[in-house]
Image (cartoon, grey):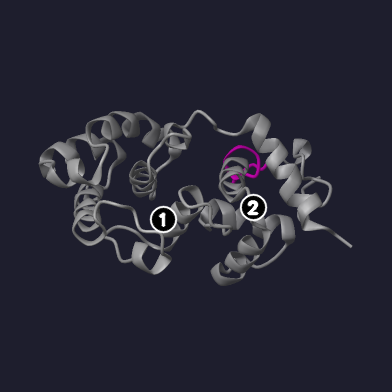
Amino acid sequence: MFDPQRGFVDPLLSWYEQNGRHDLPWREPDRTPFEVLLAEIMLQRTTAEAVAGVFRPFAARYPTPAAAAAAPSDDIKGLVEPLGLVKRAAYVRQCAGQILSRHAGDVPREHSVLVDLHGVGEYTARSVLIHVHGLGVAAVDTNVRRLLSRFFDVTPEQSQIAVLADALAPSTRSSDFQHAMLDFAAEVCTADSPGCSSCPLRGPCATAEE
């Protein structure tokens, strides 16, 4: 019987240890909860490579909810403009203001409270719970959905994939597991030309190409 821990989770984490994008600035271990939330908002509908060039100067200038909420909107727009979707500037300012007024400047720990913040949806809330609070769940985006639907040969329908992803997430390494799925989907199990011939998960993968 196939063991998903040995056949998928463990080899994926091993691949991530050697090949993951550990240099992304928001993955640095000393990043604050607000900085992680900030990065997740920036990453919405944008590549990690694009955000990497914007995140570090933004976080240095506005490292706290108080600093971001007090910033002139044009200043924030100028910093996030390279990412496109300038409405992200409003997301950051309003979200920071809500954290200040409702939560005494602390990023919430509850899912229902996080999704009530401006600009924070299901994926962003789960990502914060995983990377900040170590919750043993997963967050499903297009890349994670593609990876899991291919490997396990299941329909990419959102709710089914979300249940599967949560079941796979290791309780003690959920942050590494989430990053591993994202990086593997970006580097190996890509949308158009997946690297099946050299894929370390090829053996048990249900849809590996010859």
Q: Amino acid at mark 1?
A: Thr
Residue 87's tag is none
Q: Quadrant of residue 18?
A: top right
Left or right of 79, for residue 111: right
Q: Nearer the viewer, mark 1 or mark 2?
A: 1
Q: Quadrant of residue 195?
A: top right
Q: Residue at x 35, y 29 (%)?
A: 53
Q: Residue at x 80, y 51 (%)?
A: 7
Q: Position of residue 120 (x, y in %)?
A: 34, 59
Q: Is residue 118 above or below residue 188?
A: below
Q: Position of residue 193 (x, y in %)?
A: 64, 42
Q: Residue at x 73, y 62 (%)?
A: 153
One can see residue 195 in this view: no
Q: Which residue has dot 1 on it?
A: 124
Q: Which residue has dot 2 on it?
A: 147
Q: Residue at x 25, y 55 (%)?
A: 99
Magenta region, residue range: 185-194
Instruction: Name the residue at the right extreme.
Output: 1
Residue 112 among those drawn in magenta:
no
